[in-house]
Amino acid sequence: MNTRLLLSSLTLGTLAFFACENREAKKEKLNVLFIALDDLRPELGCYGLDYVHTPNIDQLAAEGRVFFNHFVHAAACGPSRSTLLSGIRTTDWDIFKTIRESGSKPAGIFSLPQLFKENGYRTVGIGKISHQPGGVMDSLQTLHEVPYSWDESYAPVGEWREPWSAFFSYAGGKARTSYYNRPTNRSLPPFEAAAVDDEGYADGHNAAAAIRQLQQLKDSTFFLAVGFYKPHLPFNAPKQYWDMYDPENIPASDYQEMPENVTSDLSLHHGRNSYEPRGTYTWPGDTLGWRITPEREKTLKHGYLAAVSYVDAQIGKVLDELKRLDLDDRTVVVLWGDHGWHLGDYGIWGKHTNFDIALNSPLIVRQPKMKQPGVPAHGLVETVDIFPTLADLCGITAPGHLDGTSFTSALDNPEAPLKEYVLGERDAWGVLGRTVRSRDYRLMVWIDKASGDTLEINLFDNREQPLPHQNIREDHPQLVPDLKKKLADIDQEKTDFFSTL
């Protein structure tokens, strides 16, 4: 070989080597696809429920890590999402309001998407990620709820014209409410099964928008968050998803009675009035205030499952596109439910309690080159841990004020030790409910906010079947002070969000 040919070969070989190195380096900077669902309890096939049709979520679980004991901080949309996005345990429905209204950007990192944006990521939010659909405060979608954080944040509205109407969408452009200081339409039922395609309801539009964004972002490094609305009320889904279920084969709740040995309904936190479906919707042919009869319970559970299967199909479309674009080998995928939901458990139809039914929600994480995929993790994790975990996975330094801790060790090893205790709160009607959950027990302390007096203490054994249904405080007095001490210790670790700004 002559010298010129040798040098040419070496040059080509060197270029090929560096091209390969550059591709590998590019792969090291992982994208994030974050999928949020509203009111989704672990009513999924991958959580062991074989009567639920969720093939796409189940496939994600088979390729990733399912966390069986993931708990949100508060069983309500706003506080749970504020906790997720701020990395701070909070009961605030709009923790970013002060920043938004100040008109000036704080010096430090205050939100999860902001962290990624300031580290060179393209950040896009679709649907419901923060409390407001589209992450916007107005029907024209001009004012971001979480400022200085998203390159784009919006909700596709289709025939419903504005985000809140899309959130409460019925077929044909109808909506239960449009918010924005306009009256709520309470005349519509809590369910619908129209003979429409997937874009006959808003989540079909959310999926289509996510697919378009992936196509636009494929050559970028991105943090794409897609917030689906279902299975939140109304339990509306195209008829094909209702037809997946025989209502006679849908199981009722395992325990529908009030727990034993409780002195009031504080542990239920007024939940047995089930005001969300009863007070804001009208059953066909009834006036306001309809009763949830056994037959109506079947219909509500049927609607919930249909909505779950509908949103599962939308998730499948997005994940298929991620794979088609060859992005799945350099993208972390997270599926997160903002809290659970009582489907007749303890006689409740709704959220807003401190029981596992309301605070336990799905969490699935898939990372490239997953170790032991499909093996679930049973350790305790919290929503507040997601912020530092995503930063850790993507090689970004998280701010030091976060309340959570990274659970990346459990992504490599499902048996890795995680937390001994997790914290939860419920703040409403002048009462603050504090709760701490260990592996086996849940302590609830109910406090009068005006006086500071302790109103009631409940202790439940989470090993009790089919659900924890006895207040065992009197039988295990030694456990109460120990768990109260843990509650106080965790509370001392909570960060004042505004002191970080």
Image (spheres, helix red, strand yellow):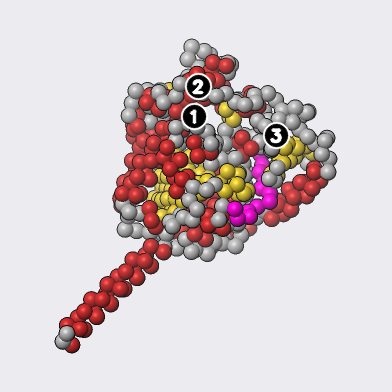
Residue displayed at 47% across by 25% down: 303
Amino acid of disc 1: Tyr
Q: CA distance from mark 1 to mark 2?
A: 8 Å
Provide the residue designation for mark 2. 249
SS of the residue under disc 2: helix
- Give residue 52's position: percent from left, percent from top: 48, 31
Please identify the quarter of the rendering in which residue 327 is found: bottom left
The C terminus lies in quadrant = bottom right
The amino acid pointed to by label 2 is Asn
Q: Which residue is mark 3?
A: 464
Q: CB atoms at circles 3 and 2 under 8 Å apart?
A: no
Percent x, y for residue 377? 57, 48
Q: Nearer the viewer, residue 8 or 82?
A: 8
Q: Is residue 39 visible?
A: no
Give the mark, 1 or 2, whose residue is nearer the N terminus. 1
> What residue sits right under mark 1 in the picture?
51
Mark 1 → mark 3, Cα distance in angstroms: 23 Å
Which badge, 1 or 3, is on the more N-terminal residue? 1
Q: Secondary structure at mark 1?
A: loop
Q: Are marks 1 and 2 in contact (CB under 8 Å)?
A: yes
Query: What residue span does the magenta drawing correspond to?
Result: 415-429
At horizontal 50% and vertical 53% (from top left) the residue drawn is: 372
**Residue 269 location, x and y as percent?**
68, 31
